[in-house]
Amino acid sequence: MSQQQRIGYLGPKGTFTKMAVDAFFESGDFHSFESIPACLDSVEHQQIDTGVVPLENAIEGSVHLTIDYLIHHVNLSVIAELTVPIKQHLLVHPDYNGEPITRLYSHSHAIAQCHQYLHKHYPEADIEYTPSTGRAAELVASSGKTVAAIGNYLAAEEYGLCILDENIHDYDNNHTRFAVVQKEAKTLKVKDHPVIKHKTTVMVTLPKDFAGALHQVLAAFAWRRMNLSKIESRPMKTGLGNYFFLIDVDQPYDQVLFPGVQQELAALGCNVTVLGSYPSYEIEIPFTAKNI
């Protein structure tokens, strides 16, 4: 009997990452981590085989901690991407009796996704950021009756909380992309989900900041008719003005177009690193909120 694959995710229980993991994987030996770096470090040191961490939210943009840690601290490959709908709820202790809420807990991205709601309904409440929405729910369960958390229905069920208000995010089209990463390629046992596209993510660094540098980089893709779905710059952390570009190409890595791009950019003095070529899945999750 083969050993189950060890799969880590941003925890604790009740996070959106855990919901994505439950919906995507058919089986595995699952481990939760309190932070994104802890999860990625565990994959890097091969304490687990696969890690799942948030990568980008449709409202708040990229999760910079994930991107920077993948670039600067670990050497991992992105082997899949999961796009999951996000629905945020206001969670309270089961003994809550209508008293004014004085403190709100959640992850910084969840707080930002509900900014207008909080501004309108709880302008006086103190905001405290937590490593995850699951951790926020855990704090409310152990705290008191005048605090609340922003999280999902799974967090409410896991920690015995009540959903005071449903779907409090400011925009309906709220989705998060999660990166599935590995140190060494291992086959995943996953459920049947539609693949919406295949992508390749590359990192491009420039030899120096010169006029037209980004134009020349993009031209290498453009004349080959390679569609770019995302271009983002992040600091190299080597000094002011030093950046790398993270580029998502909407096609799998091949042995013709991509080597041509790499050779052309190398001639310009650029360095190109392929971070992964992978399928992008769209995950459907049944969001049946339960007022428990």
Image (cartoon, grey):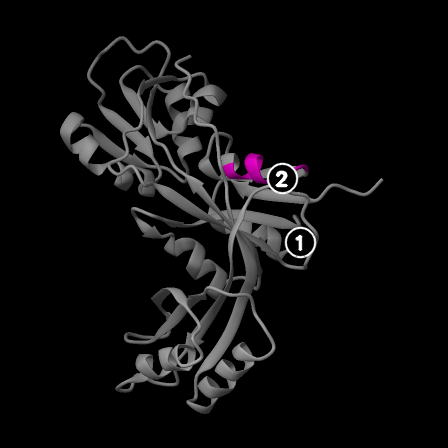
Which residue is drawn at the image coordinates 66% and 50% (left, top)?
49
- Quote the CA–CA distance across marks 2 and 1: 24 Å
**Marker disc for residue 191:** 2
Quarter the N terminus occupies: top right
Q: Look at label 1 and name its amino acid.
A: Gln
Crowd band around label 1 with a 10 angstrom C-alpha radius: few (<14), some (14–19), many (20+): some
* Span of residues in magenta: 20-27
Q: Which residue occupies the foreground of this view, 72 or 256?
A: 256
Which residue is drawn at the image coordinates 52% and 84% (left, top)?
260
Q: Quadrant of residue 28?
A: top right
Q: Look at label 2 and name its amino acid.
A: Lys
Which residue is drawn at the image coordinates 43% and 27% (left, top)?
287
| Residue 124 appears in the figure | no
Q: Which residue occupies the foreground of this view, 134 or 22?
A: 22
Q: Position of residue 192 (x, y in %)?
A: 61, 40
Residue that carries the numbered disc 1 in the rendered image = 46
Give the answer, above or below, for where 29 lies relative to 54: above
Secondary element under disc 1, as helix, strand or loop, is loop
Crowd band around label 2 with a 10 angstrom C-alpha radius: few (<14), some (14–19), many (20+): few
Quarter the C terminus occupies: top left
Single out the mark in the foreground, 2 or 1. 2
Tell me if 24 is positioned left or right of 282 in this view.
Answer: right
Secondary element under disc 2, as helix, strand or loop, is loop
Which residue is drawn at the image coordinates 48% and 33% (left, top)?
285
| Residue 95 appears in the figure | yes
Q: Position of residue 139 (x, y in %)?
A: 39, 26
Q: What is the count of numbered marks?
A: 2
Give the answer, above or below, for where 292 lies relative to 212: above
Per the image, is 23 magenta?
yes
Give the answer, above or below, for where 216 lies relative to 4: below
